[in-house]
């Protein structure tokens, strides 16, 4: 790639990042916006939606080695549009970037990639399903069976995933409201993956297996102007049930919450603002910031009163868009493990 092409790529990527996590509350003029009562079209909706401004394919996994050591894994591909629609070659307004990470009890390895749409360096096809950026891949004939790979300076992983349950739709049939003003996204998940494979770490290869959770979400203005960040929990309980819950923090100190209870058979119950609660119990200094690393989480309607604690307090994603993301363990009324993402802790 020429120096000029690299500079163009960086300029476009910077524009996309400016409307990334920190810009999700800005005006969506010109872009499509989610509407209530969505009708999903599969497999097409597993693919990209270029008329919407932001979209992601977001996979996290809780892994265990044969010696009992816990690990976490993340693979995320983001699409961010500078303008709605698609075009060929360098004229494409779509910018792609990706994050990958492996968390151990005492280390957190991260990597980041950037690409322009339209030139084949990154993208997603729906049938057969494939999401890629450079040599990072999430691919399979369908979402039910996937091969997953990514690498960074200090890690590589190659994984195989098999779905053991149905897709789950959050909010009202996949229309997930994010604020009292009505901002929303389309949001569904596949939280029933079994995963196994090999981590390549500085100490050598590690065979691992466990569970994984894929989130699919797209929107053009999923936050309001008064929201500064979020705390997002995906919890897999030992009794087979699962809980997705998030807090969107308001600049006045209040928060907006939403949750989905997922039964072992995939049946769901959605909860609106106020039903799900999460409060920090302990903070740690991470990357010069005060980050909550232990939480009290509750969903009283389901008898959930648990403590959620980070496996590794230092799971900081020190990338172009910085945030915290890592595996957690659950104790209290229920036990289990899951993942926690926290943004907006500047």
Image: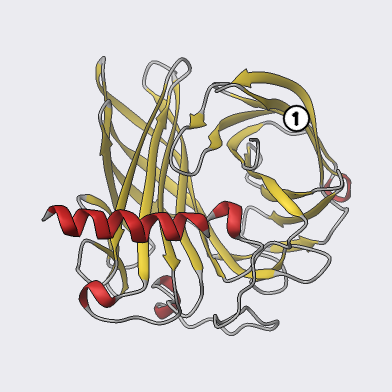
Q: Which residue is rendered at x = 42% and y = 71% of the image?
A: 46
Quarter the C terminus occupies = top right
Of residues 267 and 204, the one nearer the viewer is 204
In the displayed structure, 319 sits above or below 213; it is above
40 over 48 or under it: above or below: below
Q: Determine whether, in the image, residue 157 is placed left or right of residue 319.
A: left
In front: 139, or 8? Answer: 8
Can see residue 138?
no
> Going 36% across and 70% down the picture, which residue do you hit?
94
Q: In this view of the protein, which residue sits in the foreground, 294 or 51? A: 51
Relative to residue 14, is residue 322 depicted above or below? above
Residue 335 rendering spot, x and y as whole percentages: 68, 31
| Image height of 193 relative to 116, above or below | above
Lateral position of residue 44 relative to residue 171, left or right: left
Label 1, on which residue? 295
Q: Residue at x 40, y 73 (%)?
A: 48
> Which quadrant would residue 253 be assigned to in this image?
top right
Residue lying farthest to the left in this orientation: 2
Residue 185 visible in the shown view: yes
Camera-side residue of 102 and 51: 51
The residue located at (20%, 67%) in the rendering is 120
User: Which color scheme does this rendered protein use?
Assistant: secondary structure
């Amino acid at each position: 790639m020429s120096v000029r092409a690299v500079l163009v790529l960086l300029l476009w990527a910077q524009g996309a990042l400016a409307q990334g996590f920190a810009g999700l509350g800005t005006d969506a003029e010109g872009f499509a916006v989610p509407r209530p009562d969505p009708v999903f079209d599969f497999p097409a909706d597993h693919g990209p939606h270029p008329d919407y401004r932001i979209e992601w394919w977001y996979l996290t996994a809780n892994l265990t080695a044969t010696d009992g050591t816990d690990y976490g894994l993340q693979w995320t591909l983001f699409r961010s549009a500078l303008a709605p629609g698609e075009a060929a070659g360098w004229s494409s307004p779509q910018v792609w970037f990706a994050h990958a990470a492996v968390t151990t009890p005492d280390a957190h390895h991260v990597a980041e990639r950037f690409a322009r749409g339209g030139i084949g360096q990154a993208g997603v096809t729906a049938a057969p399903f494939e999401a890629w950026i450079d040599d990072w891949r999430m691919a399979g004939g369908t979402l039910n069976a996937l091969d997953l790979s990514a690498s960074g300076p200090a890690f590589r992983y190659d994984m195989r995933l098999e779905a053991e349950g149905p897709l789950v739709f959050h909010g009202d049939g996949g229309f997930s409201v994010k604020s009292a003003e009505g901002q929303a996204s389309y949001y569904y998940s596949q939280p029933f993956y079994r995963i196994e494979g090999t981590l390549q770490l500085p100490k050598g290869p590690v065979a691992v297996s466990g569970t994984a959770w894929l989130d699919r979400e797209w929107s053009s203005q999923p936050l309001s102007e008064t929201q500064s960040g979020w705390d997002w929990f995906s919890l897999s309980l030992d009794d087979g049930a699962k809980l997705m819950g998030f807090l969107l923090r308001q600049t006045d100190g209040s928060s907006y919450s939403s949750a989905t209870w997922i039964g072992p058979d995939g049946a769901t119950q959605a909860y609106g603002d106020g039903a799900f609660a999460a409060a920090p119990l302990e903070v740690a200094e991470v990357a010069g910031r005060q980050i909550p690393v232990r939480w009290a989480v509750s969903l009283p309607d389901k008898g959930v009163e648990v403590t959620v604690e980070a496996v590794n307090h230092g799971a900081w994603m020190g990338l172009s868009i910085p945030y915290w993301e890592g595996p957690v363990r659950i104790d209290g009324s229920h036990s289990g493990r899951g993942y926690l993402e926290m943004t907006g802790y500047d």
